[in-house]
Image (cartoon, rainbow, N blue to C red):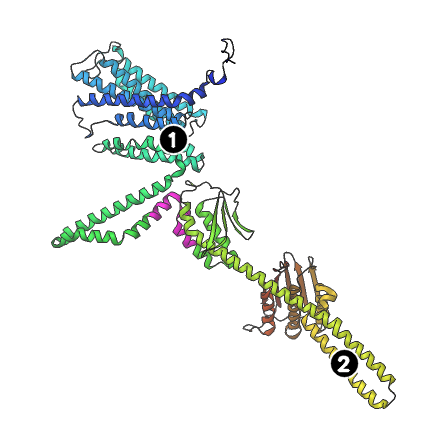
Amino acid sequence: MARPLLDSAEPRPRRLRALDWPGRVLVLGPAVAVAIAAVAICLELADIWVTAQLPDSPYTPLPFAPEDVAGTTFPIFGALLVISRPRLLLGWLLCLGGLGSAANILAANTAALLVLNGGHPLVHPLWVFADGVWNLTTYALGVLLPLLYPTGRILSKRWCVPGGVTAAALALDWLCSLIAPSSVRTGYNALEVAAFAPYYQGTRQVMHTVVAVGMALAFSSLVVRFNRADGIERRQILWPLVAMAGVVIPWVIGYPVWWTASLTLPLVPAAIAVAVLRYRLYGIDTLISRALVGAGLVGVVAAVYVLVGAGSSLVLSGVDRFAGLAAALFAGAFFHPIRSGLQRLVDRALYGRGGDPLALAAGLRRRLQHADPAHALLAALEVLREGLSVTGLAVEIDGTVTTSGRPGPVTREVPLVWHGEPVGRLLIGPPGGRRFPAAHDERVIAVLAPYVADAAHTVTLTTALQRSRERILTAREEERRRLRRDLHDGLGQTLASMAMTINMARHSLERSPETADSLLRDLREGMNSVTADVRQLVYGLRPPALDDLGLAGAVRALAEEARPGLAAGAESVAEVEVTGDLAGLPAAVEVAAYRIVQEALTNVRKHARARSVRVVLHRNGELRVVVADDGVGLPPGRRSGVGMSSMAERAAELGGTCAVTSEPGRGTTVTARLPAVPAPPGPG
């Protein structure tokens, strides 16, 4: 079946309808930008022919002017931006600014050539045209570009004021050139206003001043935008600023080096294109750092060479031929120290005190020397967070996370490796407010990550050792508990049953009752002794009072036993204070606390001559045991005996501490801190 033709009244398909403005920009924009660049290049080719007819310029050795360079390079890079980002105004500004620059230099040189050949009526119109396109170029590249860079949007409506004032000044300046008085250079002006001639130069000077102020305000918007921007946008702003320095510095120095600005001018549109399209591939701060270090090295080596050469020629004129060799040897010997010193100065200038990796490493080493293994990782994280200028860092080790600051969303993850063995992960949070948030992260991480890995490995070993020790102690105490139960419920009951059987036999014997009775009585006494020994053994393994009364009750029983040993007096008292829940304590912690209290009370009875003693058991995350008396205290210079050493060893076995403080005449205080969290069960 034949396909019917579209009726003229039928709506056209969507793809055939007229595109809206954004759509037209996307479709036609690249072609228009390429056409603008082609026209600008053609104008520059024409200007090359015109310039060849003019005398050589006395101000520059180059056969071209800065406008020629701008007219060629700006449209090319602008077209590249338009092709990649058609809706971004920056590319269009570069294209139009380059086209205006090319048109300006061609019109100005053509007018100069006509004047050289005797004049022509088109001289003044050409100058008016050149002034007009130059003012448009100035507004596009000197005002709009900095106001819109790098997002293509103005910061706020308030920044329209300098843009509007500058536009008005440029328009008035062009109007002045339109009614300017005739001259040999500009030719005859049919629109000349004779009454305006005395004010012509002054008016244009005022307009140029207003334009310069407007351009300065436009560029100051980049400073405001830089302070408000994030790390990515800051890098985009820095790229063209660095390139502009290569143009501004020769221009400020002036004659005879100003012409070198023509050679560095292409760097400006190139930097803008790189900053917009490929900013993630390059670190502008790294470029600045290396450029400053390289320039410093060249300057130092050159200064050394000049100083050594001058000194040898003045002081040792006979050996001045060796000055070059001496300078070269000196520069070579001190090349690396000079480079390191310059790099540190540049890092300090760009990133502050927190940005020098070597200074950070030195500070971290000092902190690690005074930090215990438990706090070494946190110290390393704090120093690394300062060096990276991020909101927070964290290290994950076997599911346990150690945090410094507020990491927030993790922006980067770095594996921590200790001698080829993975020990954890370093989690880096978002950047803070430094001038260069992620500038030299690789250098800082490369220098400090090994310290973090060492600290993480130390934490892993410490944790493994602590868990192993806790498992050993727990197993030992549990085994003691089981042994006590077996001895008491097994052997004890058996011996008691044997005693009862012997008693029955003693009463039933009829032969030699006296002898049998004596033997059985001796056996009975021996069995009682065995039973007492067994009970004493059980008591040594684990105090029965802990199982019968609990830790609090057992300690109260110890205090009651210690009361008669205190100094005589109506105020003699032994009190026990218990706070917190003591239920569920590990067996090893119960035994250690009981033995420490027992040893402390024994010392009070034997040596303190105290009238009161106070025992405190407090559990809040850990078990704190305090035994304080009001006795005579420890004599100065007294060495720790077996009892005190035993208390300290029992606490250390569990990973706790035990301290004894005393002042003569003010009593003695024993303070023990024991971990009160049950250890996780071991494997298997």
Residue 527 badge: 2
Q: Which of the two marks, 1 or 2, is nearer to us in this view? A: 2
Residue lying farthest left? Answer: 318
Would you place residue 427 above or below residue 230 in this image? below
Residue 220, labelled with which disc? Answer: 1
Q: Provide the residue span drawn in magenta.
A: 343-363
Left or right placement of residue 549 versus residue 52 in this view: right
Q: Position of residue 439 (x, y in %)?
A: 40, 42
Check the picture and name the quadrant holding the C terminus. bottom right
**Towards the viewer: 242 or 558:** 242
In this view of the protein, can residue 208 be seen by the observer? no
For mark 1, give the secondary structure.
Answer: helix
535 lies above or below 444: below
At mark 2, the secondary structure is helix
Question: Measuring 60% from the left and 71% from the top, which residue is drawn there?
Answer: 646
Residue 331 image position (x, y, % from top left): 24, 51
Residue 18 image point, x, y percent: 46, 15
Q: Give me the residue at 70% from left, 69% from top.
A: 558
